[in-house]
Image (tube, rainbow, N blue to C red):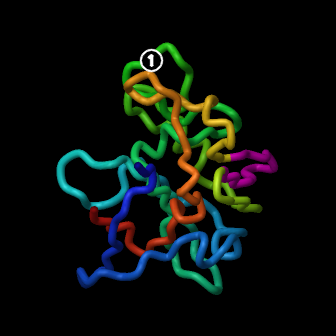
Amino acid sequence: MTNIIECVDRAKDGSNTDLVTFKQVGSKRGINRKIIDIHEHIGDYGMGGPGFYGFLLSQTSEYDKEWLILRLWGAGTWLLFNGKRVENTGFKTNVNAWVVDDNIEIFRKLLIGNKIIDMDISTNYSILKMQKDSIDNILEIPKDTNLLSKYANNKNRTWFNSEDQRDAWIFSKEGKLYL
């Protein structure tokens, strides 16, 4: 069993490229970059899909614009923004979240323009500290998964001991992921 979804990354010319994971490159690749766009279903995987979240990062002197992607099934249901769930499983409408009824616009306005100032990603939690208009914000996968919405079967989300969140976060030039 796994939460991290295996996929391939495609270049503009259609060729497969190696996945670049956070584990391989570390926080330097994301720090001091602004989030300039967000996509809640990034990738090209036909009808439906796993719901990867992608955050387009600004260009720097070292890196072109590229996507920071969380490749977890239903990635938005794994995330908290400033302690509030980004998404809930579909039937949990009574629980407050930033994205309600697939309307991502409020969350988009809050997130776009944030500059990542620190990335603390380990095997079982992820914390992206960011700042926008002198306001500190945190996007995270908490260590305590009880803070997240439950699976559709009403069971708590579980991070498996065999998984490493540093493998769940990837950098992609085009955001063209295929399962």
Q: 142 or 1: nearer the eye?
A: 1
What is the residue that sits farthest to the top in this orientation?
A: 94
In magenta stretch: residue 132 = yes
Within 10 Å of disc 1 (Cα), the crowding (few <14, some 14-19, many 20+) is: few
Q: Residue at x 66, y 42 (%)?
A: 142
Q: 107 or 160: nearer the eye?
A: 160
Q: Residue at x 63, y 86 (%)?
A: 62
Tag 1's secondary structure?
Answer: loop
Query: In the displayed structure, does residue 108 sit left or right of residue 46?
Result: right
Query: In the displayed structure, does residue 23 sit left or right of residue 104?
Result: right
Query: In the displayed structure, does residue 44 sit left or right of residue 99?
Result: left
Write the start and end of the magenta stretch as one range: 125-138
Coordinates of residue 112 in the picture (x, y in percent): 58, 52
Q: Specify the quadrant that holds the C terminus.
A: bottom left
Q: Residue at x 53, y 80 (%)?
A: 64
Residue 167 lies, with reference to residue 129, above or below; the image says below
What is the residue that sits farthest to the right in this orientation?
A: 134
Q: Residue at x 44, y 19 (%)?
A: 92
Q: 75 or 14: nearer the eye?
A: 75
Name the main secondary structure of what is drawn in magenta. Answer: strand
Q: 110 or 117: nearer the eye?
A: 117
In magenta stretch: residue 128 = yes
Coordinates of residue 20 in the picture (x, y in percent): 50, 76
Coordinates of residue 149 in the picture (x, y in percent): 52, 28
Coordinates of residue 12 in the picture (x, y in percent): 30, 80
Q: Amino acid at mark 1?
A: Thr
Query: In the displayed structure, does residue 144 sit left or right of residue 94?
Result: right
Task: List the residue tagged with mark 1.
Answer: 93
